[in-house]
Amino acid sequence: MLTNTEKKEIIKTHQSKAGDTGSVEVQVALLTTDIKKLTEHFKENAHDFHSRTGLTRKVNQRRNLLKYLKGVNIERYRALIKELGLRELSN
């Protein structure tokens, strides 16, 4: 789980204008950070199946947001996946 200060820092880094907290870039960045934290959590807690369900939901939500962004604006999509170090979606 992200702390408020971590969330604010991620939002500040990825927002397109002041006050932007809901753009696709911000949402994907927040989800990516959360996914990385959960992945680290599972290295020590392999049997935490409830949290694994949450991880699956977050991964699916991020994939859907990236698919949307790829369809709307391919340049923003490519810049975002490069910045976050993600692989390109295969369609």
Image (cartoon, rainbow, N blue to C red):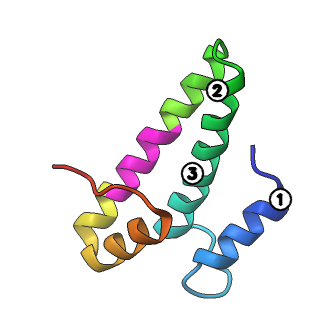
Prevailing secondary structure class for the magenta stretch in the rendered image: helix
Q: Earlier in the sequence, mark 1 or mark 3?
A: 1
Q: Secondary structure at mark 1?
A: helix
How far across and how far down the image is residue 48, in percent?
Answer: 67, 16
Residue 16 position (above or below residue 26): below
Q: Which stretch appears magenta?
A: 58-66
Read off the residue under disc 2: 42
Give the CA separation, mark 3 to mark 2: 16 Å
Say which mark, if any, is on residue 31.
3
Relative to residue 25, is residue 1 drawn left or right? right
State the SS at label 2.
Answer: helix
Image depth: mark 2 or mark 1 in front: 2
Residue 59 is situated, as x and y percent measured from the top left of the image, at 46, 40
Dot 3: element: helix
Q: Amino acid at mark 1?
A: Asn
Q: Residue at x 49, y 31 (%)?
A: 56
Determine the residue located farthest toward the top in the rendered image: 47
Is residue 85 toward the left or the right of residue 37 in the image?
A: left
**If the image is split into quadrants, where does the N terminus sit?**
top right
The residue lying toward the viewer, choosing from 28 and 86, is 86
Mark 2 or mark 1: whose residue is earlier in sequence: 1
| Residue 60 covered by magenta stretch | yes
First in residue order: circle 3 vs circle 2: 3
* Residue at the disc numbered 1: 4
